[in-house]
Each structure stands twice: as C-alpha cells, then as structure tokens.
C-alpha cells in the first residue's frame, strides 16, 4: 500500500536528518522524503503533526526461551509487544528450547515470524553444540540458514582452548561473536551484586570481577584470533572501561547495555523485590553513572531491552529462588528517552542507540530512513504522559519493576515493511 506520513519531525541519525518533512512509502519502501512527491496518490495518510518519526527500533537481545517449540505462541505475543514498543527488528540469542544449533530450528522461528507479520526476527546461532561448550557447532550451516552471528548464550565456555578454536572458526566465516561475559565460578549461586545491599539482605553476591575477569579473557582471545565480537549487557564500570581501552587499540569490538541497568541499581531491590532480580545483577550507583557516561562517550553504542517474559509464578517465592529477568520490550523506548529528558544523552544519541547502531552491529539494512530503504518506522509522541502499567503490556510477561513510573514518548504507530502493525488506541 501507498502510505503518506505528513507533518512529522523526522529524525534519522544515519543521514543526520532532523527536520519537519513528509515521508512517502510505496510497496514497503521509502520512495521520497520532503515537502511533496509528484504523482503520488496515497492509500492512507497519517498525520504526524507534533510527533517524532524515526526508524523502527532494533533490539539486540530478546530472550524467547520457547520460540523454537512447535506448540509455542510466544512469537505471536512478543512480536505484538515489540510493535507496541516501536520495535521492528528483534534479535534472538541461541538459548531457546531447543537450542538454535541447526538450520531446522532457524527455519521454524523465521516461519513463525513471517506468519506473525509484525517484526523482523534475526537469530544468533549456537557457538557449540547444544551450548554445552564441548563440540563446535556447524557454523557454516547456521550462517547459510540465516544466522547473523554466533554465541554460547548464557553458558560460558569453561575450556579456554575450545573458546579460542571457536573464535578462530567464527573469524574464518566472518561471523560476529556475541558474548555474555560472566565467570561461572565467581558468579556461583549469587543473585545480586556483591556489596552493601547483598550483605544487608543476606543474599549471595555476584562480584564485579565475575564480569571483568571474563571480559579480560575474551579481549585477549579476540586480539589473538581477530574475530569481530560484541559484548552483551555490560553492567560494571570497570568492564566498560576495559572495552573503551580495547576499542582505542583498534580491536574489532562493540558493546551494549540494557535499559534497566541505566536506570536501576542494587538499591532498587529494596526489600527483596524479585521484579528487580536480573542477570547480570543491578550494580552500584557508581556503576550506573559510569554506564551512562559510556553511552554518552560512544563506548556502549547500543541500548537493548534484554527482554525476558516470565509468568507470574517465576517471580514468587524467596528472592534467590525466583527466575531472573525483566519484560522490557514496551519500556525500551520510554526508558531510553528518559535519559534525554534527564540531560544524560542527546536525542540523536538516544535514537541512534536504538536504531542505526544496533543495526550496524548486526550487519543488517535497518535502522535508517533513507530513500530505497525498507519502511520500518516508529512514530512517537514526545509530549505524551502516561503511567507504566505492566498488566497492560501486550507481552505475555508482566514482570517489570517499572510499574507506576511516569513516562513520556508513547508510541503512536509502528510501521513494518510499509504496513501499520500497531496504532495507539486501535
């Protein structure tokens, strides 16, 4: 269909565009940007006056454990939640059930995503078979089937030689390695950041060295093997500074941070609030401030949701026995824009960290509003005011610690491949 978006403030960090223009869409592509376009008869006109029109958001890490199960409806519900949050591209790590270590699983997930028709879904393949850290996966077959990268998910490879061989293999295939840096021995059975709060509450702590030692090991191996790598969910100031230094030396690395780590700290656990139970854990106030600084400085170039939808039972019981995870798709944009409202980052930085930067990390054509590009678009209202109500989430997971927070920048419409897949109030 032909779609005409009028009067919107178009912001596209890729082209450094920030101006009021019209946007013309035909056959799923952007065909013109400007005041008019000759001989264009729209099937639908969308008035975006006083609204911001930006590229559809790209989320680097959306954990959908049941995405590859035959009976699962998780892709249907979570792509609906993504559309409501302005997200048009999702990236799924390999630790689904079953693991993404075969072309058949990739095809199943992609088929489900096409049938849902709301967002693009890209998969990251398993680095080792069944993520067990013993035998390397068939990376070539996974790449040919459509995987955009390789990871061992939350399962740290304990044998350093196997890690090196896996990196070397990935490098020969020009596959990006996605890393969740955590030393399993130091992490042990911990569930919160090791510090004042863990001591006060009597909970097992996870020291910052559980992250920094793992980052140090992998940086050395990256330097040895030359593999391109991306670090997911950096949570400590020291690890972020290690990445800063490595990037300054030219290592082919990038890194992201979750939206909740930029707003919450160990103190938000309060009196055993299991909704704030997440891995990596919420760190100290200093860590949070330094992570914000690293976003400002371009060390952490992407902000992700690290979305993990859980049922209500998963958050019941003693804190240490609850399942870690936050439902984050529908709070990703307002939390990131809250950093703009608080003068922590610029508007261009915020939108870039959610669009073109993660798209560049994934190596995909997304996150931009340029003539000829796929029409994936997020339209949001910077002047809106609403209360976060997790029970109103489209996601199957209502597990969010942001209930009652007052947000601006509500999504008004989401367009995927030229089709309106979400519209506020409809």
Image: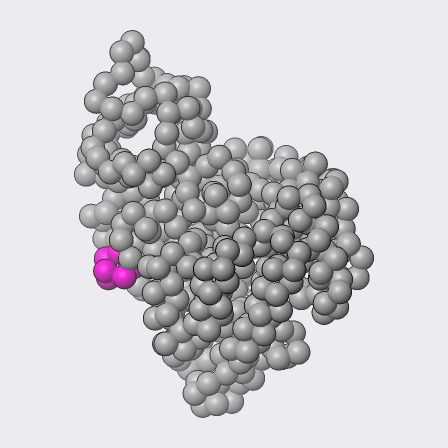
- Picture layout, residue 390 above or below residue 193: above
| Foreground of the two, 221 or 52 | 221
Image quadrant assignment for residue 189? bottom right
Q: Is residue 335 magenta?
A: no
Q: Can residue 379 be seen from the camera position used here?
A: no
At horizontal 46% and vertical 37% (from top left) the residue drawn is 366
- Picture layout, residue 398 above or below residue 323: above
| Foreground of the two, 142 or 113 | 142
Q: Can residue 370 be seen from the camera position used here?
A: yes
Q: Is residue 341 magenta?
A: yes
Residue furthest right as drawn: 135
Q: How is the image coloured?
A: one colour
- Picture layout, residue 333 above or below residue 372: below
At horizontal 73% and vertical 46% (from top left) the residue drawn is 139
Q: Which residues are magenta?
A: 339-344
In the rendered structure, the answer to whether residue 388 lies left or right of residue 171 reads left
Q: How many marks?
A: 0
In the rendered structure, the answer to whether residue 96 lies left or right of residue 255 reads right
Relative image position of residue 109 (x, y in whole percent): 64, 41
At horizontal 65% and vertical 74% (from top left) the residue drawn is 184
At horizontal 66% and vertical 56% (from top left) the residue drawn is 225
| Foreground of the two, 408 or 106 | 106
Residue furthest front as drawn: 249
Relative image position of residue 173 (x, y in whole percent): 69, 43
- Which quarter of the rendered picture does the C terminus lie within? top left
- Which quarter of the rendered picture does the N terminus lie within? top left
Image quadrant assignment for residue 19? top left
Relative image position of residue 274 (x, y in whole percent): 48, 73
């Amino acid at each position: 269909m032909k779609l005409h978006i009028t009067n919107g403030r178009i912001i596209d960090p890729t082209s450094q565009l920030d101006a009021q223009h019209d946007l013309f869409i035909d056959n799923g592509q952007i065909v013109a940007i400007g005041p008019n376009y000759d001989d264009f008869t729209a099937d639908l006109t969308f008035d975006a006056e006083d609204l911001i029109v930006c590229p559809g958001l790209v989320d680097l890490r959306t954990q959908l454990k049941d995405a590859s199960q035959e009976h699962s409806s998780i892709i249907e519900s979570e792509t609906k939640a993504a559309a409501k949050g302005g997200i048009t591209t999702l990236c799924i790590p390999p630790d689904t059930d079953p693991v993404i270590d075969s072309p058949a699983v990739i095809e199943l997930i992609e088929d489900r995503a096409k049938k849902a028709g709301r967002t693009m879904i890209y998969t990251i393949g398993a680095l080792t078979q069944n993520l067990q850290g013993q035998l390397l996966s068939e990376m070539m077959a996974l790449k040919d089937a459509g995987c955009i990268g390789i990871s061992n998910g939350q399962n740290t490879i304990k044998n350093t030689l196997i890690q090196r061989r896996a990196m070397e293999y990935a490098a020969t295939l020009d596959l990006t390695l996605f890393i969740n840096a955590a030393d399993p021995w130091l992490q042990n059975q911990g569930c919160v950041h090791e510090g004042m709060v863990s001591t006060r509450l009597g909970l097992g702590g996870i020291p910052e060295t559980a992250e920094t030692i793992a980052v140090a090991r992998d940086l050395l191996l990256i330097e040895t093997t030359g593999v391109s790598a991306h670090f997911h969910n950096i949570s400590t100031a020291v690890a972020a500074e290690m990445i800063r230094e490595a990037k300054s030396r030219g290592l082919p690395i990038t890194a992201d941070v979750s939206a909740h780590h930029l707003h919450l700290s160990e103190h938000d656990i309060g009196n055993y609030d299991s909704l704030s139970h997440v891995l990596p854990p919420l760190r100290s106030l200093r860590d949070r401030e330094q992570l914000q600084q690293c976003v400002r400085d371009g060390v952490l170039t992407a902000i992700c949701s690290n979305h993990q939808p859980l049922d209500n039972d998963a958050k019941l019981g003693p804190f240490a026995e609850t399942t870690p995870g936050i439902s984050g798709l529908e709070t990703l944009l307002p939390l990131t824009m809250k950093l703009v409202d608080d003068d922590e980052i610029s508007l261009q930085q915020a939108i870039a960290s959610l669009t073109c930067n993660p798209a560049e990390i994934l190596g995909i054509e997304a996150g931009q509003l340029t003539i000829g590009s796929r029409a994936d678009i997020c339209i949001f209202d910077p002047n809106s005011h609403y209360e976060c109500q997790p029970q109103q989430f489209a996601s199957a997971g209502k597990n969010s610690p942001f209930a009652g927070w007052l947000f601006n920048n509500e999504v008004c419409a989401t367009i995927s491949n030229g089709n309106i897949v979400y519209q506020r109030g409809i």
